[in-house]
Image: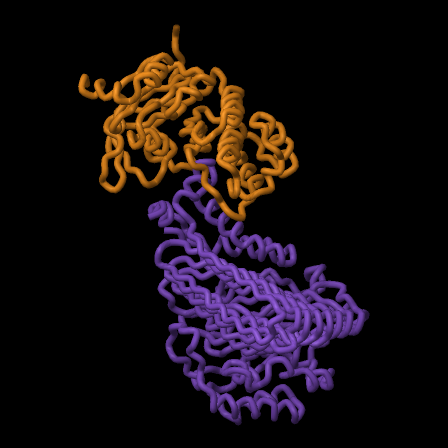
Chain colours: A orange, B purple
Amino acid sequence: MTKSNPILEVNNLLASTEDLPILKGVSITVYPGEIHAIMGRNGCGKSTLSKIIAGHPSYNITEGEINFLGKNINSLEPEERAQSGIFLGFQYPIEIPGVSNLEFLRVSTNARRKFLKKEELDTFDFEDLVKEKLEIVKMDSAFLSRSVNQGFSGGEKKRNEILQMALLEPKIAILDETDSGLDIDALRIVASGIKQIANNKTGIILITHYQRLLDEIKPDYVHVMSDGQIIKTGGSNLALELEKKGYEWTDNFIKEK
Amino acid sequence: MVNENLVKEVVKEPYKYGFVTDIETEKISKGLNEDIIRLISTKKEEPEYLLSFRLNAFKKWQQMKEPNWAELGYDKINYQDIIYYSAPKQKEKISSLDEVDPKLLETFDKLGIPLTEQKKLTNVAVDAVFDSVSIATTFREELAEHGVIFCSISEAVKNHSDLIEKYLGSVVPATDNYFAALNSAVFSDGSFVYIPKGVTCPMDLSSYFRINSGDSGQFERTLIIAEESSSVSYLEGCTAPMFDTNTLHAAVVELIALDDASIKYSTVQNWYAGNEEGVGGIFNFVTKRGKCLGNRSKISWSQVETGSAITWKYPSCLLLGEESIGEFYSVALTNNLQQADTGTKMIHIGPKTKSTIVSKGISAGNSKNSYRGLVKMGTKAIGAKNYSQCDSMLIGDQASANTFPYITSQQQNSEIEHEASTCRISEDQLFYLQSRGIEFEEAVSMMVSGFCRDVFNQLPMEFAAEADKLLALKLEGSVG
């Protein structure tokens, strides 16, 4: 099988926050159409990796590089990364009081469209588009008039993240524990949303603790992280084995390394 | 901490109203004494009662002490170093706008307030005040057809002396406070509005105050009277050039609403705020008060305060009439070294009176922003109600925000509700918006306008859009 060019290439990434090293040499490459899962204990650096790829200002890259569509993006601002097609689904979506969800979604969608040299949408056209996308996550349009994530339940917040993903049509989506705090019905909705948005041109990285999301969305690769490094990579079976044996089992891999 | 480098890169938008109009002015000599007051009164050809109003105020002022309870930090004002009357030289009697000095027309053009017949704003009548005098008022004839009087207060003194004598100082007495007394002694011009019984003013009225001269103060006085069952919406805007000295602005505004009348008074205050080091800027000490004299009358203040080195103002309502309503909606934004101490007083005197206070303070840079408000229920305020909501937003870690609510009730059968909150724009909120492709600056201004939404909704539409833009402009480069 000949592979096209990778969407995302993280090469030997070292990063720290306030001089505390968090990532200690992470490499991961995502090709179009691939779904990767990253698993690992709390504090192993999974979320940090996702934030660094999205450009969070609290972390410094001390070594290594992040290439997106063949270009080094180490020094790009978060908004530039987002506009060019990197999407981070937040583990804890942030509440923004007073800013209407609809307006937020519109400004954000237009920022991406502008980058793609597509026509920006006015309020009316945007409402048509967003109603269509609401179907994907089975959300009521009443959500649009509320403040961004304010007073949303855990499940509603996560569905709102997937709605944003659907509107922004990213090249790569990194979904940080999108499954946490969801009941089984909400999990199905979110998973089916992700599957509808993903296609053979996009890449997905799922950060998760649990097998149950991976039952819904079967990953091509599973990476296990520990102490700021990827200590093992395998196919979807690795996740199943991990579920059975627990993270203690993976501690041996560190010793092997 | 938040994206420091980016913030530094952001080019600061200069204060775009900071220019000076080069125009020949008639100024009297510096200083304040009885002779100066007599001179101002003579220049304005005032009747005797007004001169004694001024002299009485001056006498009281001399015995008063400059208030310091707001704990604002500023160098002592030398009241003898101020020019109390400064007016552009022009023909004595102007019969039409075409005779106004083109330089003045040009100035107001530049400020976005065209005055000439061809260019004037179509939906709003404007009284343009330049330093100490009103230079033009548009749509006077059209308004007169409805019986509405809209002119400078100097003209009202000449032409509607009965109303002036009856109402001037009836809401804010000459001796009310230090700055009101000063204003009463030396006030030069301002706007006068009279809405007759049963008339809904056919268009918005507005005054635009422009300070041009660096060494003279501006002491305007506005008086609005709404007769029974009438209503009016009044807007005011203010700007000044950038001088490295401080200019004193001490205005008095009085509103009177009779039975079933309603007055909506909106302000966008954008006086020069001084530079980043806090040099220069306007000292804004203003007394604004409305009297709901009639039953079921209503006075609503909305203000967007973004300018001035110091803001000291508390637009208030005296709720005398039964079931009368007072409202105060305020956004006060301070940046760099600005200081604002602003709020309101709702004095419930009549039964079943109602008041609503919504105050949003935003402090950035090293600024200090305080809400100070009084809610008082008098002995006869049976069934009166007040609701207050005071929210503060801090940007950066050097700014300060305070809330000082004063509540007194002499009537058990009344309700007072007070809510307050303080928030900070967090790095996580900014990152969240940025990670959706929204530019840093836009993210900040989105959050700030979101925070002010409740107040902006109260502003006339064009004003709300302007206020939104103004806040975005003022905040540029403030997040760091």
Q: Residue at the location (38% across, 68% down)?
A: B279
Which residue is pictured at 55% across the width and 70% down the height?
B344
Q: Is residue A253 visible?
A: yes
Residue B146 rendering spot, x and y as whole percentages: 80, 69
Residue at 57 percent across and 41 percent down: it is A103
**Residue that extends furthest to the top in the rendered view of this protein:** A1
| Vertical relation: B130 (above or below) A89 | below
* Residue B241 image position (x, y, % from top left): 48, 67
Question: Does residue B85 sit above or below B60 in this rendering?
Answer: above
Q: Is residue A73 left or right of residue A252?
A: right
- Residue at horizontal 62%, vertical 31%? A131
Image location (x, y in percent) of residue B312: 49, 72
Answer with left or right where residue B45 lies relative to residue A108: right
In this view, the residue in front, B143 or B403, is B403
Image x and y of residue B247, in percent: 46, 74
Can you say whether B178 is above or below A152 in the image?
A: below
Residue B20 seen anywhere in this rendered image of the structure: no
The total of numbered circles placed on residues is 0
